[in-house]
């Protein structure tokens, strides 16, 4: 039996996600087990998830997944490179995953592999440094550097355009991570169908997760049900929805009290280009989070990067708190086939497997520190609900069996 790994946020799980799982099994065999690594309470866009991680992971099991593991917080709210590295290291540590299946706009495995190789080359690093001169945004500088190298080497077409596609960009980072780990996990590119990540309207019978979140928060449940697997809308309603507006003042309070040294200590800040001073000024002027993001962003530091920095500030996630790699495998949900997969993982995993809160007590200090950080993130996530959730849910909530 093959085991396919999928990395996702499932925020929330929708028809496009179900299609991806189905296409993965179509390519590898219907008996393929699907193991997912999913973000927890907070997402890569620097915002709260639509609802809690146990509800979202249970919906993934109902939609065709067999086992859902949590992507620890530091990597869940990282850049594409960090997000991919943490997820791939988690998949590799299970010892059971054969294939990494990912969505791709281009479905061009050869082109994606070439880009992954190029981005890890010394000529690219030199070209990127030149391209960044003058304050060019990182994404544009990277694409320009890749385009120049491809032309120098006489390669036809323009593979650099793939880096402007969100799924292709992430796919390249998955491949880079597999290469860096010298992993035997094989990549599988599944062509993405339907609406793009932030599309405001459905396309080809699929709606984006952002559109579905907007519908849910507006209370348009019939429309949510239309674009998600049966029963999803009712489950989301019962679970309750998280909203950033509920923690806006708390976040602003945190930002207003931070010093330049505090901002410089955040992951991904590093005190470069006077950013900490700019963040202090922006925090003291802004009356809303959106105003803070707008005031703080620069050509080099885009909106999404500033959102992640603000979230790290709120969560108290400093560079010093970031371990080099994941420290454990946290189980969120599983099916019957997933339970069998867990038994195999216990024989082959290179990291401790957490299925009970009591297991945390047996972890090494670095792993316990990471779990405590995760728990703090979940406790603060509880403030995002209209009815505030209690602290300690990471210690009191076990995996969901569907």
Image (spheres, helix red, strand yellow):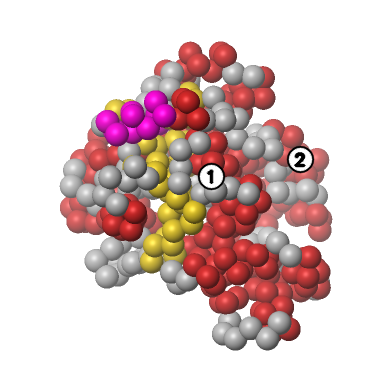
Q: Secondary structure at mark 1?
A: helix
> Would you say residue 40 is visible in this rendering?
no
The spot of residue 242 in percent (x, y) is 40, 40
- Tell me: residue 46, above or below residue 198: above
User: How many numbered discs sit on the rendered protein?
Assistant: 2
Residue 384, placed above or below residue 295: above
Q: CA distance from mark 1 to mark 2?
A: 24 Å
| Neighbours of disc 1 within 10 Å: few (<14), some (14-19), many (20+) | many
Examine the rendered structure and indicate whether residue 148 appears above or below residue 18: below
- Which residue is depicted at the point 49% across and 54% down? 186
- Identify the residue shown where x is 74% and y is 34%: 320
- Residue where numbered disc 2 is placed: 265
The residue positioned 68% from the left and 35% from the top of the image is 323
338 is within the stretch colored magenta: yes
Q: Is residue 339 visible?
A: yes
User: Where are the magenta residues, as a range?
Assistant: 332-344
Q: Residue 33: x percent and y percent?
A: 34, 42
Q: Where's residue 73, x and y in %? A: 56, 37
The residue closer to the viewer here, 148 or 298, is: 148
From what the image shows, is residue 299 above or below residue 173? Answer: below
Along the viewing direction, whichever of 177 and 256 lies nearer the viewer: 177
> Which residue is found at the position 58% from the left and 82% from the top?
158
Quadrant in which residue 28 is drawn: bottom left
Give coordinates of residue 64: x percent, y percent.
Answer: 28, 45
Q: Is residue 134 magenta?
A: no
Of residues 112 and 355, the one nearer the viewer is: 112
* Quadrant in the picture for the C terminus: top left
Of residues 240 and 175, which is closer to you in this image? 175
Is the N terminus in the top left, top right, bottom left or bottom right quadrant?
A: top left
Q: Seen in the image, is 272 located left or right of residue 340?
A: right
Q: Which residue is mark 1?
A: 87
Left or right of 131? Residue 111 is left
């Amino acid at each position: 039996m093959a085991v396919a790994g999928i990395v996702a946020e499932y925020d929330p799980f929708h028809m496009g996600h179900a299609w991806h799982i189905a296409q993965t099994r179509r390519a590898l065999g219907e008996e393929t087990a699907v193991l997912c690594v999913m973000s927890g309470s907070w997402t890569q866009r620097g915002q709260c998830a639509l609802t809690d991680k146990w509800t979202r992971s249970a919906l993934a099991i109902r939609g065709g997944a067999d086992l859902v593991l949590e992507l620890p917080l530091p990597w869940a709210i990282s850049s594409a490179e960090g997000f991919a590295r943490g997820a791939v290291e988690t998949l590799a540590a299970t010892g059971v995953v054969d294939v990494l299946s990912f969505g791709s706009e281009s479905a061009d495995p050869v082109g994606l592999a070439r880009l992954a190789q190029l981005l890890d080359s010394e000529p690219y690093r030199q070209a990127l440094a030149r391209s960044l001169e003058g304050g060019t945004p990182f994404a544009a500088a990277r694409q320009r550097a890749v385009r120049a190298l491809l032309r120098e080497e006489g390669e036809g077409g323009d593979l650099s355009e793939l880096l402007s596609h969100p799924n292709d960009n992430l796919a390249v980072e998955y491949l880079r991570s597999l290469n860096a780990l010298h992993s035997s996990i094989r990549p599988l590119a599944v062509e993405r169908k339907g609406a793009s990540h932030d599309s405001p309207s459905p396309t080809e019978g699929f709606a984006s997760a952002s559109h579905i979140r907007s519908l849910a928060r507006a209370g348009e449940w019939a429309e949510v049900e239309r674009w998600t697997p049966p029963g999803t809308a009712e489950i989301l309603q019962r679970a309750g929805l998280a909203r950033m507006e509920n923690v806006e003042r708390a976040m602003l309070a945190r930002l207003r009290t931070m010093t330049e040294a505090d901002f410089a200590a955040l992951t991904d800040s590093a005190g470069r280009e006077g950013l900490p001073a700019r963040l202090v000024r922006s925090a003291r002027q802004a009356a809303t989070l959106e105003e803070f993001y707008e005031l703080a962003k620069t050509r080099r530091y885009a909106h999404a990067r500033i959102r992640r920095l603000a979230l790290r500030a709120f969560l108290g996630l400093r560079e010093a708190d970031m371990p080099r790699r994941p420290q454990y495998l946290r189980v969120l949900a599983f099916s019957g086939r997933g339970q069998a997969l867990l038994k195999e993982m216990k024989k082959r995993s290179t990291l401790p497997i957490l299925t009970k809160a009591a297991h945390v007590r047996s972890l090494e200090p670095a792993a316990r520190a990471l779990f405590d950080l995760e728990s703090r993130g979940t406790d603060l996530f509880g403030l995002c609900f209209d009815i505030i959730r209690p602290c300690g849910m990471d210690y009191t909530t076990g995996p969901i069996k569907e």
